[in-house]
Amino acid sequence: MSKDVIIACDFSGKKEVMEFLDLFTEEKPYVKIGMELFYGAGPEIVREIKKRGHKIFLDLKLHDIPNTVKKSMAVLSSLDVDMCNLHASGTIAMMEAALEGLTRPDGTRPLLIAVTQLTSTDEERMHKDLLIPNPIDEVVMHYAKNAMTAGLDGVVCSPLEAGKVKGVCGEKFLTVTPGVRFADGDVGDQKRVTTPEKAKELGSDYIVVGRPITAAEDPVAAYRRCVKEFLG
Ligand code: C5P
């Protein structure tokens, strides 16, 4: 199982992201492209970054009827991304359809990861707005199990939940974990954070790191430190 550091390239435009990637002359980091950049710069940005030799996690969090998700996933798969995601709340049928759409004629496909409950949704909002009465931990684990049942590869979760997810879904089920900060770094708006070293200890497979790298004075040094702490 390959573990890696994924840089969240939360830039608003092509120019900014390319300038950032130009800093990396020796390594080709795995990068996450989110909705803002994808909707602003279009699929071409994925092709260009891929052409430069980076692995790509396309973070578009699909959620629609199974047929629409299936067809959309086929489009994303043809962009040759390495990982993409959807909302587990779209049901097992939607997740199965997504996998079908993602699978290329030669049988290969990008990894498919589910979002369980967004970290911006707390238990109170889940109860009151979404009318889901169960404890949030139970809902997160239930959605993770649904993702596994549908054949997905893993979930996005906090490093603090990685062990529990693996306990429920098995060691091979991937955990992709944001909320990572250096011990001596700014926490920013993240609430529950762990260091790359701690994320490794807790069993994360991929850590998603944005501002500790993108906003660092020396992003390449920050990336290398992250890799050393997480993979070293
Ligand atoms: O800058 P920072 O390291 O906080 O970036 C984390 C990245 O992971 C951002 O792109 C953010 O949108 C994403 N993310 C997150 N928490 C989640 C899901 C995704 O921080 N639960």
Image (cartoon, rainbow, N blue to C red):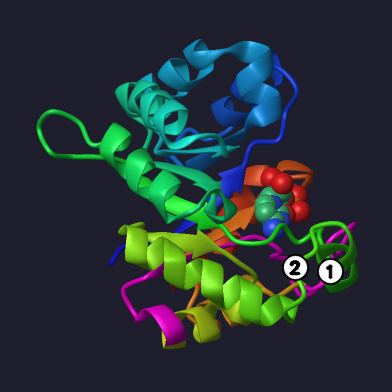
Identify the residue at image location x=65%, y=70%. 158
The answer to whether residue 14 is seen in the rendering is no
> Of the residues shown, which amino acid type is indicated by label 1?
His
| Image disc number at residue 132 | 2
Would you say the magenta stretch is mainly helix, strand or loop? loop
Residue with the mark numbered 1: 127
Q: Is residue 220 left or right of residue 12?
A: left
Identify the residue at image location x=64%, y=54%. 209
* 154 shown above or below 105: below
Q: Is residue 155 left or right of residue 117?
A: left
Front-lying residue, 225 or 162: 162
The answer to whether residue 195 is seen in the rendering is yes
Identify the residue at image location x=60%, y=66%. 157
Mark 2 vs mark 1, CA separation in Å: 5 Å
Name the spot of residue 165 as percent of width and height, x first.
50, 79
Element type at mark 1: helix
* 132 shown above or below 223: below
Name the spot of residue 206 as percent of width and height, x first.
48, 61
> Magenta segment: does it hold 154?
no
Front-lying residue, 136 or 20: 136
* 170 shown above or below 47: below
Quadrant location of residue 36? Answer: top right
Upstream in the sequence, badge 2 or badge 1?
1
Q: Are marks 2 and 1 in contact (CB under 8 Å)?
A: yes
> Of the residues shown, which amino acid type is indicated by label 2?
Ile
* 77 shown above or below 204: above
Q: Which range of residues does the magenta coloring cover?
A: 168-192
